[in-house]
Amino acid sequence: MHRVISSGELRAGARRAASAWFSPALADASSRSLHSPSFATIDIEDISGSHPGEVQNLVQGNWKASIHWSWLLDPLNGEQFIKVAEVQEKEIKPFVESLSNCPKYGLHNPLRGQERYVMLGDVSAKAAKLLAQPEVSDFFTRLIQRVSPKSYNQALAEVQVSQKFLENFSGDQVRFLARSFSVPGNHLGQQSHGYRWPYGPVAIITPFNFPLEIPLLQLMGALYMGNKPVLKVDSKVSIVMEQMLRLLHNCGLPKEDVDFINSDGIAMNKFLLEANPQMTLFTGSSRVAEKLATDLKGRIKLEDAGFDWKILGPDVQEVDYVAWMCDQDAYACSGQKCSAQSILFMHENWASTELLSKMQHLAERRKLEDLTIGPVLTVTTATMLEHIHKLLKIPGSKILFGGEALENHSIPEIYGALKPTALFVPLVEILDSNNFELVTREIFGPFQIVTEYKHDQLDLVLDACERMHAHLTAAVVSNDPLFLQDVLGRSVNGTTYAGIRARTTGAPQNHWFGPAGDPRGAGIGTPEAIKLVWSCHRELIYDIGPLPKHWEVPPPT
């Protein structure tokens, strides 16, 4: 007889797992952090139907509620546990006015308000120091788990990347982002200067799957370059960034620098059309991305969906490691990463190994108790099972493992609950125009396609990659330099890992993460990404003279 696992037991299990994964010092700190940090307005342990969390809006430097509260269901048991003050269409005026009050030359730029570069470097340094404290790190890790259930290790990694990013842009590093250059002119007194210039009023829209890392890194990048951002995070997880904003205010960020809005899509779209931001950063679904690109007349940067591929080359080695990495790429965070492994192209040499059986064994280790598998927040169980059913109608397709709903849980039906799943589809069938769109549909959950290719079919694999419409991440798993050279030279994905340890997932603070092949593509995390997304080029040409002696007005030309 199976017993249904409660939400409280799941959270307790996640904390016990943390003790096993991390040092005793951190585990002790985790067990002691029964009280919230000084900046926090919530106690994670108390968030429940009887003690709901509350999310407010921030506009013109003031935290405010709304005439309408939207209730969120606990992803683990369906209980109403957080209420969000969602701004209605008739309430957007203060947000429109706040953003419109920012001039196009920004809150600061290389020629004005330079002390703000210094201030933001100090804020980053203080925030990085605070976020490095075990009790604060644990607070955000558990808060992330509460609203976007994932293992403690995965949630902690998000906090650590955020902390390192703030550390990277402490002190003078903010002003270094605005480094300019000059070129000598044609005559005495003439010189051109190239500057990185802010857009001024901007908007940031981010998804649920990384409640801290994505919005924080993009928000700080926007501020560093001199912009005034309004931040909209998916309401399912916006409580995380609400608490982070309070931390940043505690570290010296002026409250008027950022507006924070919770709303549905209709109200947000109306706000964007009325406020008319100079630039909007959108991270999320391709469908919404294309609508916004039209509505905003192209003034947008995108990091939208990705059907991300991994190619295993002909040189078989380190089978255990490759299997483990495939499991992590496909099923960590229950597959809810824009960089998750969506399709595995396996060279025939790997088919004779134990790779697939090892992948199955690793997938079957995942369990709800420690959130190594958990709720899928944007795709229902029924939708995922229906997709599997359609794929199984393709000749030669078969389920390798999974393909069933999770059992013995209290996850509400509005969310998904699927066992880690891999489904084999023959390569020639994938390329069939009648099947390609179905096979390459991104399922934002614990699901992947697996296929096999012969030694003379690499062109077919690369043709499939070329036909995909989103080009975010990819992996080429091989140490054969000629194979790597061939595949990398004929592909486009913006963040591509190469080598026997290659992965598709991973957006740390130390390298660019973003798509390629689209002029609207956005990056995150690095100086190059910040400058590309949050500033434009401005050229100033100084020509102060003096005029040549005996200068006269020339004939007309």
Image (tube, rainbow, N blue to C red):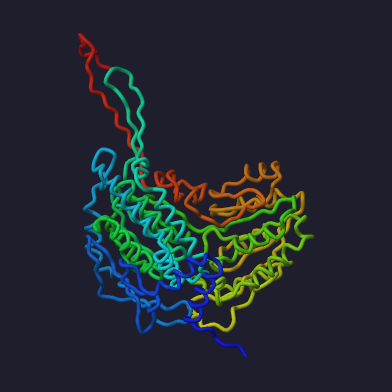
> From where the camera sits, is residue 522 visible?
no
Q: Position of residue 108 (x, y in %)?
A: 26, 45
Quarter of the rendering containing residue 85: bottom left
Q: Quadrant of the C terminus?
A: top left
**In the image: residue 134, left or right of residue 365:** left
- In the rendered image, residue 4, in percent from the top left (x then y), is placed at 55, 86
Residue 459 in sight: yes
Total number of numbered labels? 0
Q: Nearer the viewer, residue 265 or 168?
A: 168
User: Which quarter of the rendered picture does the N terminus lie within?
Assistant: bottom right
Give how far across and how far down residue 26 sits, in percent. Answer: 47, 66
Residue at the spot x=57%, y=63% of the render? Answer: 441
Asked whether, in this view, residue 419 is left or right of residue 451, the answer is: left
Residue furthest out toward the right: 352
Question: Residue 535 versus residue 220: which sits nearer the camera?
Answer: 220
Residue projecting furthest to the top:
550
Q: Quadrant of residue 290?
A: bottom left
Q: Is residue 431 left or right of residue 62?
A: right
Q: Residue 15's x, y, as percent? A: 50, 73
Q: Quadrant of residue 81?
A: bottom left
Q: Is residue 114 above or below residue 84?
A: above
Q: Is residue 387 above or below residue 201?
A: below
- Of 285 and 30, the residue lying toward us: 30
Nearer to the camera, 361 or 421: 361
